[in-house]
Image: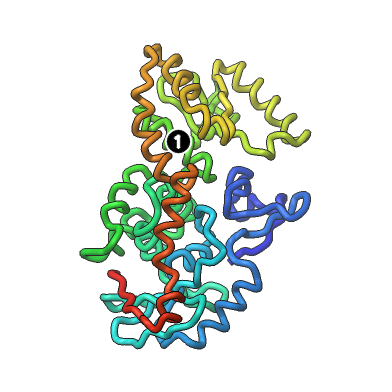
Amino acid sequence: MLRHLRLRDAPAYDLTRSILRGRTWTPVSYGLYQRSALTADEVCRLQAMRDVLPGGAAWSHFTGARLFGLWLPHLPHSLPLMATIQPTHTRPERDGLYVARSRARLPAPVVLAGLPVLSVPRVLGQLAEDLSLLDLVVAIDCALQHRWCSESDIFAAVVARQRGIRMLRAAMPFADGRSESVWETVLRLFHVLCGFRVEPQHKVRDQEGRIVARADLWLPETCRLPEYDGGDHRGRSQHRDDLRREKVLARLGMERYGYTSDEILQQPSRILTDAEQVYGLAHDPRRLGPWLQELRLSSFSVEGRRRLAHRLHRFDNCRALKAGRPREIREVG
């Protein structure tokens, strides 16, 4: 797996600036990025802890998701390492380790950095047990965008009576692998949940049919291009490129509307009004209902982060072990 990347080498790996702005990559110096999944020390810890797991076990759930570099919410530092073992194996008990026993026989794991990991589709199925719809779609978009799996692979990995299966099935219609960053997915879902159809990664062409720009989103049958503006747009070089790009779009009659994360989360009515006006619709605040409901449940809100932290308490088996009350941990799938 690619761990470090120079900006000038990004095209060779089909990586764009938008991808490098996402949660998968972290800037460590000018023009140099590091994958923001697991640190070297964490990988060493996983390799050491692997010795206490039985054969056929694989790292899973949030640990597996971080190994793949999926876009995830900010997780508690106290979250234990997570692994899944075969149905017939004995579950080891260690502080800082959560082991689930699969009900069905596990397929051969994927090997990353010398570590066995459940496949991405199965990891997504486990994430569906704890993540909200918005957070789960973000993770699925990442998997599809990097082509680690397809939608059919995800459905094929679903096990009957699996926990989280309803959430996974609810999230899949909203997933789109063309999204290149977390906030592109969030901005797209805002429009979709408010009742507007959008096209991600829209290619803008000039009069000769040449592609002159590519926009995060396009509201079909309009000239509006909603986009996410991250912190990197404040740099002098990037700002200069943005101004040049906006002039090209303006000459073609296209309007770029850039939104920050604060606007998406704190001023959604303004974005809604922008979309309504371009379609000539009267303002109807009720359109915000589905978005506000999913936002409250997600880690993008204080309430949603508290909800997620409460759900993750079920992985803290240390208290039960210290109290002499070991509990059976089983998992469907």
The residue where tag 1 is placed is 188
- Residue 21 place in picture, x, y as percent: 62, 46
Query: Mark 1: few, some, or many residues within 10 Å (few <14, many ≥20)?
Result: many
Q: SS for tag 1?
A: helix
Q: Residue at x 26, y 64 (%)?
A: 162
Give the number of callouts.
1
Residue 268, percent from left and from top: 48, 28
**Vertical placement of residue 324 versus 197, above or below:** below
Q: Does residue 49 lie above or below 308 as drawn? A: below
Residue at (44% x, 70% y) in the render: 316
Which residue sits at x=53%, y=72%? 112
Asked if residue 207 lies left or right of residue 243, the reply is: left
Residue 21 in sight here:
yes
In the image as oriented, which residue stretches furthest toward the front?
A: 323
Looking at the rendered image, the quarter that the N terminus falls into is: bottom right
Residue shown at 70% from the left, 52% from the top: 27
